């Protein structure tokens, strides 16, 4: 899959305030000491993914107007974005992509990159329910799209909530590009303000990639007592 195809996918899903960076896995870069420490025991393939992710993140932050800075790894293995910024990373098929935005504009960002290939039939029912696949002629490809959208939602909420949940906690409407939390017990660990929200998930699937981004704006979550 080409850089041009990935650029086209990014163009499909971008919106004001989002800034993007892309890197090919295998590009070389000098890491900061805190970054080197994070992957000191990593196997070569994992190191290559990490380097590409940091390159993509630096490029996204540069587009946002931020100076270059280390992006260390937290104890839960998530990237630590600079103060005043939020962002997300994803890797697939030899590429890394990053999205970044200003924290005064977004509560959270989540991105997921997938090849636009059908999902294995034996895992479709794990990822998506019948309401999410309704009206879709290619159920396997639709399930892959649902998977990507749910990954983006998970990444968008996690830095704020710390909530770990499975696929049943979120319901995706591919036609309206919306996500909601379900009434499944898995969703109960998510704060009520998030559970009552309708989240936007923009997605591109026409360029050989399934690129999903969930951008949660400041003020979009209602407060509940």
Image (cartoon, grey):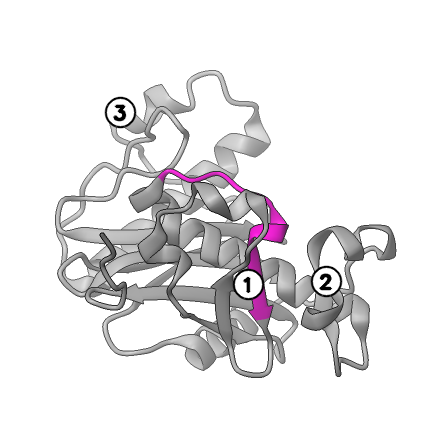
Please tell me which of labels 1 and 3 falls first in the chain: 3
**For mark 3, does the 10 Å Cα neighbourhood hold few (<14), some (14 to 19), or many (20 or more) residues?**
few
Residue at x-position 38% and y-position 62%: 196
Task: Mark 2 or mark 1: name the one nearer the start of the chain.
Answer: 2
Marks 2 and 3: which is nearer the front?
Answer: 2
Residue under circle 3? 34
- Magenta segment: does it hold 167? yes
**Residue designated by label 2:** 129
Q: Earlier in the sequence, mark 2 or mark 3?
A: 3
Q: Nearer the viewer, mark 2 or mark 1?
A: 2
Q: Nearer the viewer, residue 116 or 174?
A: 174
Total marks drawn?
3
Helix, strand or loop status at disc 2: loop
Residue placed farthest to the front in the image? 225
Residue 54 horizontal/vertical position (percent): 36, 43
The answer, for residue 22, to whether it is visible in the render is no
Mark 2–mark 3 distance (CA, rounded to whole Å): 42 Å
Secondary-structure class at tag 1: helix
126 and 192: which one is in front? 192
Is 18 placed above or below 176 here? Answer: above
**Can residue 68 be seen from the camera position used here?**
yes
Q: Which residues are magenta?
A: 162-172
**Distance between mark 2 and mark 1 Cα atoms:** 14 Å
- Give coordinates of residue 218: x percent, y percent: 20, 64
132 and 38: which is toward the camera: 132
Residue at the spot 62% in from the left edge and 52% down from the top edge: 168
Name the disc covering residue 149, or none.
1
């Amino acid at each position: 899959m080409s850089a041009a195809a990935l650029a086209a996918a990014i163009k499909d899903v971008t919106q004001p305030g989002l800034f993007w960076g892309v890197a090919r896995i295998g590009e070389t870069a000098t890491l900061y000491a805190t970054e080197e420490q994070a992957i000191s025991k990593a196997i070569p393939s994992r190191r290559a993914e990490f380097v590409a992710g940091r390159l993509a993140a630096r490029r996204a932050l540069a587009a946002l107007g931020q100076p270059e800075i280390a992006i260390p790894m937290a104890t839960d293995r998530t990237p630590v974005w600079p103060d005043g910024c939020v962002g997300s990373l994803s890797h697939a098929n030899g590429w890394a992509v990053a999205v970044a935005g200003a924290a005064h504009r977004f509560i959270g960002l989540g991105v997921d990159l997938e090849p636009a290939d059908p999902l294995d039939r034996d895992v479709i029912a794990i990822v998506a329910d019948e309401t999410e696949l309704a009206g879709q002629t290619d159920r396997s490809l639709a399930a892959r799209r649902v998977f990507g959208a749910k990954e983006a939602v998970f990444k968008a909420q996690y830095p704020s909530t710390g909530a770990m949940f499975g696929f049943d906690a979120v319901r995706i409407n591919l036609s309206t590009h919306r996500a909601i939390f379900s009434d499944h017990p898995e969703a109960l660990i998510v704060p009520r303000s998030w559970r009552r929200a309708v989240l936007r998930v923009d997605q591109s699937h026409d360029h050989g990639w399934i690129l999903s981004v969930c951008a949660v704006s400041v003020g979009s979550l209602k407060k509940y007592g």
